[in-house]
Image: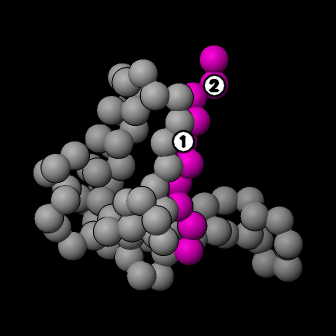
């Protein structure tokens, strides 16, 4: 993950809902190729580790990976 620690991130995650709907139906993940490589490594390392959950947030841990317009983070949890 150190590979991604010294670069400018453009990762943006926002909620999308259909026009007029109050319920969130999708998330939109935008970024450059490096951002998606970072996410693929994050998921891959999570899947091969002993951890059962991890999260990164635009206002907390992992915030350097998010653009300033990102509104939500990612919570990943293993379900057995």
Quadrant in the picture for residue 65: bottom left
**In the displayed structure, would residue 51 be above or below residue 17?**
above
Query: Mark 2, residues whose alpha carbon is within 10 Å: few (<14), some, or many (≥20)?
Result: few
Whether 10 is among the magenta residues is: no
Residue placed under numbered mark 1 in the picture:
76
Q: Which mark is residue 79?
A: 2
Question: Which SS does the magenta portion mostly show?
Answer: loop
Q: Decide which of 5, 14 is in the foreground and name it.
A: 5
**In the displayed structure, would residue 61 be above or below residue 18?**
above
Q: Residue at x 38, y 76 (%)?
A: 67
Q: Residue at x 19, y 56 (%)?
A: 4
Residue 38, position in %: x, y? 28, 51
Residue 2, position in %: x, y? 16, 50
Left or right, residue 8 beside residue 64 = left
Whether 73 is among the magenta residues is: yes
Disc 1/disc 2 C-alpha distance (Å): 10 Å
Left or right, residue 58 beside residue 49 = right
Task: Give the magenta-colored segment's residue range.
Answer: 71-80
Direction front: furthest residue = 60
Quadrant in the picture for the C terminus: top right
Residue 36, position in %: x, y? 32, 54
């Amino acid at each position: 993950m150190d590979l991604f620690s010294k670069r400018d991130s453009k990762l943006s995650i926002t909620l999308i809902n259909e026009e007029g709907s109050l319920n969130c139906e999708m998330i939109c993940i935008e970024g450059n190729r490096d951002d998606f490589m970072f996410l693929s490594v994050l998921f891959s390392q999570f899947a091969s580790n002993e951890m059962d959950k991890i999260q990164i947030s635009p206002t907390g841990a992992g915030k350097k990976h998010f653009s300033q317009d990102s509104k939500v983070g990612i919570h990943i949890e293993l379900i057995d």
